[in-house]
Image (cartoon, coloured by chain):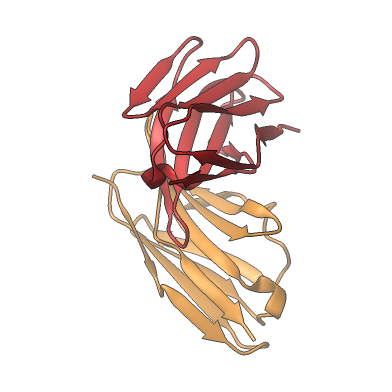
Amino acid sequence: ELKVEQNPLFLSMQEGKNYTIYCNYSTTSDRLYWYRQDPGKSLESLFVLLSNGAVKQEGRLMASLDTKARLSTLHITAAVHDLSATYFCAVRPTSGTYKYIFGTGTRLKVLA
Amino acid sequence: DAGVIQSPRHEVTEMGQEVTLRCKPISGHDYLFWYRQTMMRGLELLIYFNNNVPIDDSGMPEDRFSAKMPNASFSTLKIQPSEPRDSAVYFCAVRRADYGYTFGSGTRLTVV
């Protein structure tokens, strides 16, 4: 059974600091997605990572994928309050199914 | 651009009543998914459709839950009879090639 684990589950950080969220998965996958969810809102797509070594950046967020290690990271640079949200990774198994498996989510709170 | 419209946004109902949640994907999708989100269990996939045909309903918790997709532009998730433990946010999502899922705004269901 495919498992997707994120850590940390909760993250409280000061503005201006850097931090990394980790997403580990237990089986082969050919693509990985990162989503953001604000409280009471829907999930918004952030990044799609389609191959080993893929790196995507948008503003203060940078995502990378290492398919050999079955690991993706979401790095936050110089955090600002607006980044406070819950971040999910989702994995598509290489079995061809479109049944993506979501991680548990990381709740990020950036303190002013 | 594929988008997803869900209705109602909020639903409060009494235990034992029938509840119908609606989803209207706009265009450009081939897969449609129903998810349930709670604090305790996170995001759970309930059922998904491919070209309007149900592919995997193994996540549907009980026979009280049913879903239909009569055409590419409409899907329903029905709970009959509803119970307090069904209280959650229900999301409809569609797959966009290489972009992962696009989620609807969700329906917050409260069963009292």
Determine the residue positioned at 64% across, 69% down.
Answer: B65
Which shade is chain A?
red
Which shade is chain B?
orange
Give the residue at the far left of this rendering: B1
Q: Nearer the viewer, residue B56 or A11?
A: A11
Up the image or down, A28 lies above or below B38; here it is: above
How many numbered dots are placed on residues in this image?
0
Q: Nearer the viewer, residue A88 or A29?
A: A88
Rendering coords of residue A70 (x, y %): 64, 18
Q: Quadrant of the N terminus of chain A?
A: top right
Up the image or down, A26 lies above or below B2; here it is: above
Rendering coords of residue B38 (x, y %): 63, 61
Q: Nearer the viewer, residue A6 or B87?
A: A6
Left/right of residue A85 with respect to residue B47 in the rendered view:
left
> In this view of the protein, can residue A56 be seen by the observer?
yes
Rendering coords of residue B111 (x, y %): 62, 82
